[in-house]
Amino acid sequence: MPNVPEIHHLRNVALIAHGGGGKTTLAESLLFNGGAIARRGDVEKGTTVMSTEPEEIERRVTIAPHVGHCVWRERWFNLVDTPGYTDFLESTRGVLDVVGGAVMLFSGEFGIKTENERLWAMAEAAMVPVIGFINKLDRPRADFIRALGAIEARLGVTTLPLTIPIGVGEEFGGIVDLIPMTAWSARDGVFCQIDLPESARVDAEYYRTQLVEKIVEGDDELLERYLSEGQEPSLEELHKGLREAVITRRLLVIYCGSGLANIGVRSLANGIAEYLPSPLDKAAIKPLNGVDPDHPERAVARAPDATEPFSAVAFKTVMDPFAGKLTVIRVFSGVLENEQAFFNGTRNQKEKGGRLFRLQGRETIPVNRLAAGEMGAIAKLEGVHTGDTLCALDHPIRYHRVTFQEPTHTFAVEMDAKTEDKVAAGLEKLVEEDPTLRLRRDPATHELILAGMGQTHLRVVLDRLKRKYGSVATLKTARPPFRETITRKARVQGRLKKQTGGRGQFADCWLEIEPLPRDGGYEFENRIVGGVIPRQFVPSVEKGILEALEQGVVGGYPVVDVKVALVDGSHHSVDSSDHAFKTAGAMAFRKGLAEAGPVLLEPVMIMEVSVPDDVLGDVIGDLNSRRGRVLGVTPKGGGGQVIAAEAPMVEVLDYGNMLNGLTSGRGLYTMRLSAYHIAPNHIARVILEQEKKE
């Protein structure tokens, strides 16, 4: 592999697509054509460069981003193979924040899928220029024209084919490159130029005319020459116009072929080299603006130049129990030398640096330096996490941090009590590796809670937990953190009198308890006068009350929103003690709970649900059936609707699966705890019966 070229020859490219779109196979063909690998691997056999994890090989899906590189026509490609299945799609968001451009693959059979729409929105948000590749045109049901129409309709973008197929489905035999008007085919595995078939000539001339007309529309001088003189733009002018159209996202240029058959991939590589931006171009689209970590109100900027102070962003973390931690970075400015210390602008701490590598899938290739525009990895940076900004010690900067969608599927982790610490430690490592995972301990239910983007995502996490850290765990539905409260006042006595032959135990206290407004918490008031209960025993009474608060009388849940006043009592000069008054306080409070109209409080979630227009009614109907309350519906930019609603947590524990089913995977939602409401009696009975069974 030659040395890395000048920064204007670099192309940092994400390969993005729906699950099963063929990204990994396309990457394999690009690497092979570029001479980076001697032979192409097979996804089905798990032999591709980008298939690095056993869970990926077993499931034949990309779970995390993987980086490879090759050279094509003097351009250095850093290719990032990204996840496309819904459960892992959010990891692609972090990649789009650091690349210059993207190739989006579309299905030759189906044209566009929901994941393509989400990825398109991510690319727009990250200001990433995209070129398209209609893949798998050798499949029996492939239809190039139908795919083009679906892309335009669903993405709301004007497509511009630069290559068209020669036949489709079983008749697919090659492609026509419209700019030079040359035809290409693969014969016996060798890609070669062929004569333009007459069967493809009419379509080729039609699309070639469209291509020219759409390019001249963006340039007044070219348009004038074309309309008045019938003069087509030169080859150089066509390339310049196409580059402008791609970088400004005015048009979606489309290539086509088959990554598996390696047909059309060379033309696509030419398009990557010619039209997608270099780091210099990308900085012009999206400047390298950040802030001073010590003074966030102070803006700081960098230029994509090796002479600038070093800055980079960590966009992936790999945790290996044997090799240690590997942090994958994209350098935005300056140069990082091997073992060079630097500053973590996100966490405001110095890092001692480490060995540097260039990546080719799972292979790590040692290098001495990484310069502006490059991608690589640093070994054993314990304090660096995905999304962190790394920078020169004497020139700190912090770039905008990617915000990932909050996890939508939450479960409790079940494990053997003897292995609990080991499981928790292993999961913490996996959470550090995956920014779309969350792990916490629920203080109310004491369950270890794991949240992810879907059930498949979480099953993969448990598989990796077993493989990497030798820990076995399962998932179960998390218990909603119910509470209890009271609805009326009560005055009760707690009296403890025991005589066992020696010193006895005596304590007598009267409590008045009353409900507080919701979220009122707990209040204690001492109204003792005349010393009927000595001052030193009052804290003991409250300690007993606090212990009793932990377990109510309805279902054994914590008690909230209650005020307790200690109003009267008596003591014995010999037999009274702290322990006796603590016991009497707990006895009185439990008795008071039973007499003060105890009720069950259920957690209520505030939700935002984004759905396509055609399923809005179905989703609202489902929310209503779950005791939900719709608070409002607002149109979403780019199409669709956003429903604001609230619903009891117990009704939406499985909401992710339901929403996927109702919307065919096109719906998204977020939810967070909003409040606690009194559960209706018939609902409370069902909840308590279920809890008793469990």
Image (cartoon, rainbow, N blue to C red):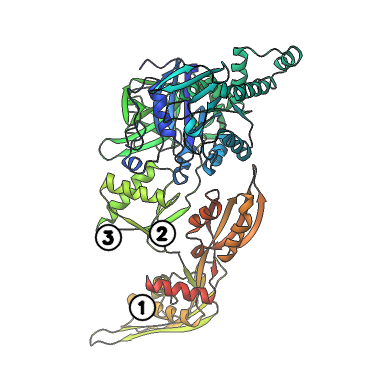
Q: In front: mark 2 or mark 3?
A: 3
**Relative to residue 9, is residue 528 depicted above or below?**
below
442 left or right of 598 in image: left
The residue under label 3 is: 417
Q: Nearer the viewer, residue 162 or 23?
A: 162
Measured in 3D between alpha carbons, the distance from the residue under mark 2 to the one under mark 3, in whole angstroms, is: 17 Å
Q: In front: mark 1 or mark 2?
A: 2
Q: Percent position (x, y) of residue 574?
A: 31, 83
Amino acid type shown at disc 3: Ala
The residue under label 1 is: 583
Q: In front: mark 1 or mark 3?
A: 3
Quadrant of residue 156 within the rendered picture: top right
Callouts 1 and 2 close, C-beta under 8 Å: no
Amino acid type shown at disc 1: Thr
**Relative to residue 357, is residue 415 depicted above or below?**
below
Q: Earlier in the sequence, mark 1 or mark 3?
A: 3
Q: Earlier in the sequence, mark 2 or mark 3?
A: 3
For the N terminus, which image quadrant? Answer: top left
Name the residue at 27% across, 60% down: 417
Q: Percent position (x, y) of residue 449?
A: 40, 56
The residue under label 2 is: 442
Considering the numbered disc 1 on the image, is that residue within a helix, a strand or a loop?
helix
569 left or right of 200 in image: left
Q: Percent position (x, y) of residue 492?
A: 47, 84
Name the residue at 41% across, 70% down: 550
Q: Nearer the viewer, residue 575 or 360?
A: 360
Q: Earlier in the sequence, mark 1 or mark 2?
A: 2
Name the residue at 48% across, 42% down: 90
Callouts 1 and 3 close, C-beta under 8 Å: no
Quadrant of residue 542 within the rendered picture: bottom left
